[in-house]
Image (tube, rainbow, N blue to C red):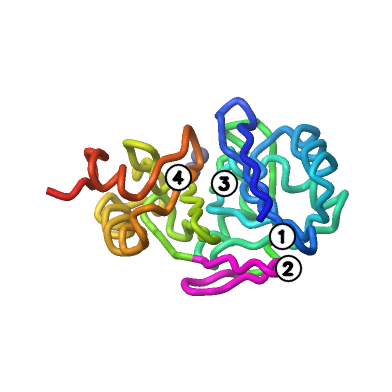
Amino acid sequence: MIFEAMEVGIYGANCYIVASEETKEGAIIDPGADFNKIDNKIKELGIVPKMIILTHCHGDHIGAVEDLVNKYGLKVCIHDNDANALSDSRLNFTKSMFRKDISITADVLLKDGDIVNLGDLKLEIIHTPGHTQGGICIKVGNIMMTGDTLFRGSIGRTDFPGGSYEEIIRSIKEKIFKYDEDTVIYPGHMSPSTIKNEKLHNPFVKEA
Ligand SMILES: [Zn+2]
Ligand SMILES: [Zn+2]
């Protein structure tokens, strides 16, 4: 598997590239900004991007979607519950964050348990509401991209529309923590961690 992480934009969102070593088919996860930086990485890796998968609808995760779609004709995938906000610049905060109206129509509506095939890779979609109603984590091999649901030592904000503190805690404990403790988590902001590390040290969800 080819896997690359890069921080993009003024809000420091993590954009990830996952691709099959075998077929070079790739997915761009949360292209939040900095189209040229992402595009250069695509060329450097020699991959053929096939789709964009969004962990959720917020502006800091979607800013380079339109440019990538225009260049590569990618399909945009997001959970069903965030598709409406993705197409509304007030609800996806691009209006307030960038004074720019970004409205994106999703091509593929994801739901919990979906498997997205990417060459020989299988990307597992895990619905983890709480930060937004349609937040997802994406697991491939030993890696889980957790968006703004679970961070190293912290959790996503729950004071936005559709957010719920009870729900995000439940999502993390019941949907994320059931996976192997050695799973490496790659969050939507800041540095990676492991499920084990978060179970031991994350003050919001650590196990007594
Ligand atoms: Zn967010
Ligand atoms: Zn974010």
Disc 1 CB within 8 Å of nearest ligand 2 atom: no
Up the image or down, 63 lies above or below 88; here it is above
Q: What stretch is highlighted in magenta?
A: 110-125
Q: Check if residue 119 falls in the magenta segment.
A: yes
Could you tell whether 108 is left or right of 42 in the image? left
Q: Which of marks 4 and 3 is in front?
A: 4
Tell me the CA gap for discs 1 and 2. 6 Å
Residue 20 image label: 1
Q: Which amino acid does label 3 sit on?
A: Asn
Q: What residue type is labelled 4?
A: Asp
Report x, y in % for residue 83.
58, 61
Disc 4 CB within 8 Å of nearest ligand 1 atom: yes
Could you tell whether 63 is left or right of 187 in the image? right
x 67%, y 44%: residue: 31
Tell me the CA gap for discs 1 and 3. 30 Å
Report x, y in % for residue 49.
79, 55
* Number of numbered discs: 4
Q: Which of marks 1 and 4 is in front?
A: 1
Q: Which of marks 4 and 2 is in front?
A: 2
Q: Which of marks 1 and 4 is nearer the N terminus?
A: 1
Check disc 2 and report its element: helix, strand or loop.
loop
Are the two marked residues, 1 and 2, in contact with CB atoms closer than 8 angstroms? Answer: yes
Question: According to the image, label 2 marks what residue?
Answer: 119
Up the image or down, 195 lies above or below 32; here it is below
In which quadrant is the N terminus drawn?
bottom right
x 48%, y 60%: residue: 134
